[in-house]
Image (cartoon, rainbow, N blue to C red):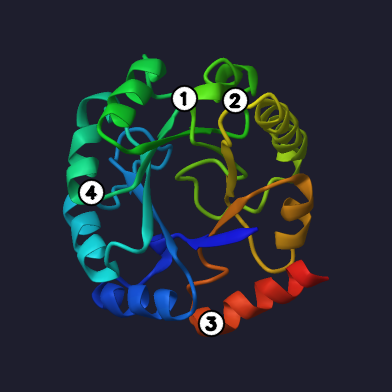
Amino acid sequence: MEITPSILTADFCRLGETVDEAIDSGINWLHMDVMDGNWVVNRTITFGPALIKSVRKRAGPEVFIDCHLMITNAEETWDQYVEAGVDMVIAHIEAVDDFPKLISNLHEAGKMVGCVLNPDTPTDDVMGILSDLDLVLVMSVVPGKGGQSFMPEVEQKVRDFRRAIDLQIDEGGKKTKLMIDGGIKDHNAAMVSEWGIDIAVVGSGLINSKGSISENLRSIAKSLEK
């Protein structure tokens, strides 16, 4: 299972140093959480294309960067994130009116497309477009709601997607990746890996004041080995 850090927990005054530290630790995928102050429940505003462009310049072309758009207008603004240098745009099924069109636009632009769904959104809402997606992201917390713990009840949702993706691959279809985000730390990383997760987004479990990114990454790696 691959680990990607959410830079949302970083000190933005030293963001460049954090990006360097993550890459030096062996990280080659960065996850950018974009909130517009409207769509998430706590009305949080994080950052936009300008900051992502700076991270892309700092990280270099070899590092994969996705943006998780928790916004109301992904269908109208996706091109700004493409221009900022992301490799993949991940948008919420709950916030996009015409997801097939968004997929088509991004693929035509040469970018990968991910679809994310909230903990209470049924898998059926995404299954119809699964064969066209490069990634599915299952949220294991409610986006924008602070102080939450990991929600183990998303297990069945993850396993349903894993089964559908494996069948899709067996039939010669797209190798859609399966990602999870929310409350992932060293104590539950092995569990979600066993569920069938390909990529785990880790925020405070990786970027915190308790240890370096390298130390925290090693702790997660040890839990996976067990």
Disc 2 marks a residue whose amino acid type is: Thr
Disc 1 marks a residue whose amino acid type is: Ile
What x and y, as percent, mark residue 116?
50, 34
Q: Are marks 2 and 1 in contact (CB under 8 Å)?
A: yes
The numbered mark at residue 48 is: 4
What x and y, as percent, mark residue 177?
57, 41
Give the distance between the C-alpha atoms of the residues marked 1 and 3, in whole angstroms.
34 Å
Give the distance between the C-alpha atoms of the residues marked 1 and 4, in whole angstroms.
20 Å
Horizontal side, residue 122 vs residue 167: left or right: left
Give the distance between the C-alpha atoms of the residues marked 2 and 4, in whole angstroms.
26 Å
| Residue furthest front in the image | 172
The numbered mark at residue 214 is: 3
Which is closer to the viewer, label 3 or label 2? 3
Give the class, few, some or many, for how many residues have Cα within 10 Å of label 3's Cα (few <14, many ≥20): some
Q: Which badge, 3 or 2, is on the more N-terminal residue?
A: 2
Which is closer to the viewer, label 4 or label 3? 3
- Residue drawn 27% across the image and 75% down it: 16
Q: Which badge, 2 or 4, is on the more N-terminal residue?
A: 4
Nearest to the observer: residue 224 or residue 32: 224
Disc 4 marks a residue whose amino acid type is: Gly
Disc 3 marks a residue whose amino acid type is: Ser
| Residue 8 vertical placement versus 211 (above, below) | above
Q: Is residue 75 visible?
A: yes
Q: Are marks 3 and 2 in contact (CB under 8 Å)?
A: no
Q: Which badge, 1 or 4, is on the more N-terminal residue?
A: 4
Residue designated by label 2:
121
